[in-house]
Image (cartoon, helix red, strand yellow):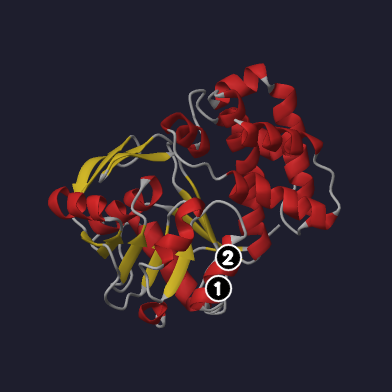
Amino acid sequence: MPSTATPDHEPGVLPPALTVAVLGPGGIGGLLAALLSRAGCRVICIAGEETTRALRRDGIRVHSGQFGEFTAAVEADTLLREPVDLCLVTVKQTALDAALDRTPAPLLDGGIVVPLLNGIEHMDTLRARYGAERVVPGVIRVESTRTAPGVIEQGSPFLDIDLAAAASREAVAEVAALLNAAGANTRVIEDENAVLWGKLAFLAPFALLTTRYRLPIGGVRSERRDELTALVEETSAVSRAAGGPADAAQVLSRYDAFPAGSKSSMLRDAEAGRPLELDAIGGALLRAAEQLGVQTPLMKRLMSELRAT
C-alpha cells in the first residue's frame, strides 16, 4: 500500500500565505478558487474574456451541499502577469495547449504547478514546459459543474485530492496543508503511479459507460452491470501493469456508493455539446494497454462506438 503523509495543520487554518493562480476556473477550478479565497488566500483566476469579466464583477458563486451557499471574491485576468507560489491547472485536456499560453513559464519559476486533469499524458506536456521539478502530479475526485461563468454547483458530498510526493517534499506538504485548510480532503502519496493510475482506472469506466449509454451511474449499475464489471477489470489490469493500484472490487464498491443520479463530467459535456475528453481518458488507456500487452476488448469497442457518435 502507498504510504501517506498528513500535513501538520489545524483544520481551517491557513499555512503561510501563498498567491495562487487557477488556470481554468470551471467546475473544478472555480470551486477550488472560491474555497481558497474564502479561507483567506489571494487567488488569481486565469480565463477567457467573458469569464474574466464575470468574475471581476460578481466573484464566484458556489452552490454546494458540502460547503454551503456562498460567494467568494477573486482576482481575474486573461493572462498571468506576476509570479505566483502555486498554479492549479484545472482546464479540460482538450483545451490544455491553448490555455498554457496564458501562464508564461518564467512567472512560475519560483512556484509549484499542480495539474488536476483527467488522464496521464498531460504530465509530459507540463514538465516540458515548466520543468519536472516544478510539476506535482495530482488528481481530484468531485462532481462539480460550472453552470454559467462564475457559477459553480457541487453535486458530490466529497472533495478529495491526492498529490504525489515530488522532489520538494516540504513544498508539496505546504500545498496539501493549504488545500486541506480550504476544505479539500488532501493526501500526499509517495508513488506517482498510484496517484495517476488510481484516478484513471477508476474514472474511465464511469466516464465511458455513462456517456456511451447516456445514463447516470444508477442506470449503468442496474442496466449495464456486466459491462461495468468487465470494464473495471480491464482498467484495473492496465493499472496493475503500469505499476498502479488494481483492486477491481474496491472500484466497484465505490461506484455502488455513488448517488444514483451521479453523472460523469464527460456525460455532462456530451449533453451540452462540448468536446469530449475521449482521447485523454480512453485513448490514453488504450495506448498504455497496447504498450504493456494488456487485452482490453470492451474498452476498444466502447471507444469505437463513442468516436462514431
Answer yes or no: is residue 134 visible.
no
Left or right, residue 228 beside residue 148:
right
Q: Which mark is residue 64?
A: none
Quadrant containing the C terminus in the rendered view? top right
Left or right, residue 186 beside residue 243:
left
Quadrant containing the N terminus in the rendered view? bottom right
Are there few (<14), some (14-19), or many (20+) residues within 10 Å of tag 1?
some
Residue sitting nearer the eye, 91 or 134: 91
Q: Amino acid at mark 2?
A: Met
Residue plotted at (77% across, 32% down):
230
Residue plotted at (54% across, 30% down):
258
Are there few (<14), some (14-19), or many (20+) residues within 10 Å of tag 2?
some
**Up-down: is 49 above or below 188?**
above
Instruction: Estimate the x, y position of residue 254 in percent, counting from the top left.
Output: 61, 35
Tell me the CA gap for discs 1 and 2. Answer: 6 Å
From the image, tell me which residue sits under label 2.
123
From the image, tell me which residue sits under label 1.
127
Q: Quadrant of residue 19?
A: bottom left
Residue plotted at (63% across, 23% down):
221
Mark 1–mark 2 contact, CB under 8 Å? Answer: yes
Question: Callout 1: helix, strand or loop?
Answer: helix
Q: Quadrant of residue 157?
A: top left
From this viewpoint, which residue is outermost toward the left? 57
Instruction: Estimate the x, y position of residue 118 in percent, counting from the top left.
Output: 55, 51
Instruction: Estimate the x, y position of residue 179 in percent, counting from the top left.
Output: 39, 59
